[in-house]
Amino acid sequence: MSGESGIDGFTIRHGSLILEVGLVNLQSLKLHEETLNAPLRSLIEDIKRSGVVKHPVIVDRDSLTVLDGMHRVQALRRINCVRALTCNVDYQSRDVTLKFWYRTLNDVDVTLALKLLEEMRLPLQRGKLDAEVLSSPDLVLALITRDDMYFSIKRGRKVEDAFDIVKILERRIQARGTLSYYIEDEALKKALRGEVEAALAIPKLSKKDIVELAGKGYLLPPKTTRHVIPARPMGVNVPLSLLMDRRMETEEANAVLVEQLMKRQIVRMGPGATYENRFYEEELYVFV
């Protein structure tokens, strides 16, 4: 299988979705989530050791909001690169879906979590699991146990204010125990089955919210969003030198990248494949 070349990069057509592999100015990319120190340090070491960036960062082609690959962007900034390897997509396409990671309290009693919220002076209501409440644009957060749901609703609250509270609560819980991360439905199932102490539900956002927050420079907590793209390119292995060369214009660097990619084959791997010891739900276009 092959792709198409263009002035801005290398294009792969996956149904109605276009995957544009190319290089963009690193400083123009907008993050929407914080990164974690340990994975970031490990990634920096891996990139320096290998001398290549293996996989593209997934980016909204219109706003240059990073949808997936926050750690790679931060790693490249720390290494003093001037450009990044990206796969640009139409974020507004129905093919790109937005999901969220809920947290689960594994070894912290829900009573302690409620006490922490009380200390933060966050008013809570008590009820049963209610999907409408969890989808409310006014939700600050919710704790779901096997029997109850404790939640805070604040009319007209700002997204940033709600997530500032989530960040504080997360830090205080992690000082006493551990959190795990699961997609919404899986986290709720674990809480309702009593497999965890509770699930912590965070506010749900729209794609517009994500773009606006990134534009403001506000960073959500790590593992807030999960963007599901039906396919992604892998194994591009762009040389680090091409990302660091300040003498070269980005257009020229893209021409070099496209020339390299046109000489390679693409192997298409269906959904559910394992690549480099990781399971992928989406299809993969692997450069070989």
Image: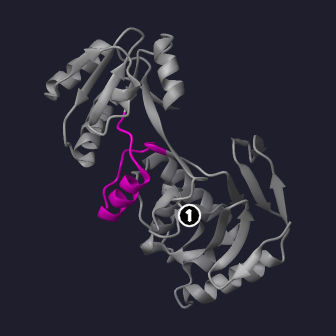
Can residue 52 be seen by looking at this rendering?
A: no
Q: Looking at the image, what colour scheme do you see?
A: one colour
Q: Where in the figure is residue 28, as x and y percent of width and height?
A: 43, 74
Q: Residue at x 13, y 27 (%)?
A: 121
Q: Residue at x 29, y 42 (%)?
A: 163
Q: Nearer the viewer, residue 245 or 100?
A: 100
Can residue 48 be seen by looking at this rendering?
A: yes
Q: Quadrant of the N terminus?
A: bottom right
Q: How many marks?
A: 1
Q: Quadrant of residue 78?
A: bottom left
Range covered by the magenta-colored residues: 202-225
Q: Where in the figure is residue 105, as x and y percent of width and height?
A: 41, 22
Q: Nearer the viewer, residue 57 or 41?
A: 57
Q: Quadrant of residue 17?
A: bottom right
In the image, is 199 to the left or to the right of 56?
Answer: left
Q: Where in the figure is residue 7, as x and y percent of width and height?
A: 65, 85
Q: In the rendered view, tell whether residue 279 sits above or below residue 35.
A: above
* Residue on which the image places disc 1: 90
Q: In the rendered view, tell whether residue 100 sits above or below residue 231.
A: above
Label 1: how many Cα within 10 Å (few below 14, some 14–19, many 20+): some
Give the residue type that dot 1 points to.
Asp
Q: Residue at x 33, y 33 (%)?
A: 170
Q: Is residue 211 magenta?
A: yes
In the image, is 110 to the left or to the right of 270?
Answer: left
In the image, is 68 to the left or to the right of 120?
Answer: right
Q: In the rendered view, tell whether residue 283 sits above or below residue 191.
A: below
Q: Where in the figure is residue 198, as x and y percent of width and height?
A: 40, 18
Q: In the rendered view, tell whether residue 50 sits above or below residue 137.
A: below
Q: Is residue 28 magenta?
A: no
Q: Quadrant of the C terminus?
A: bottom right
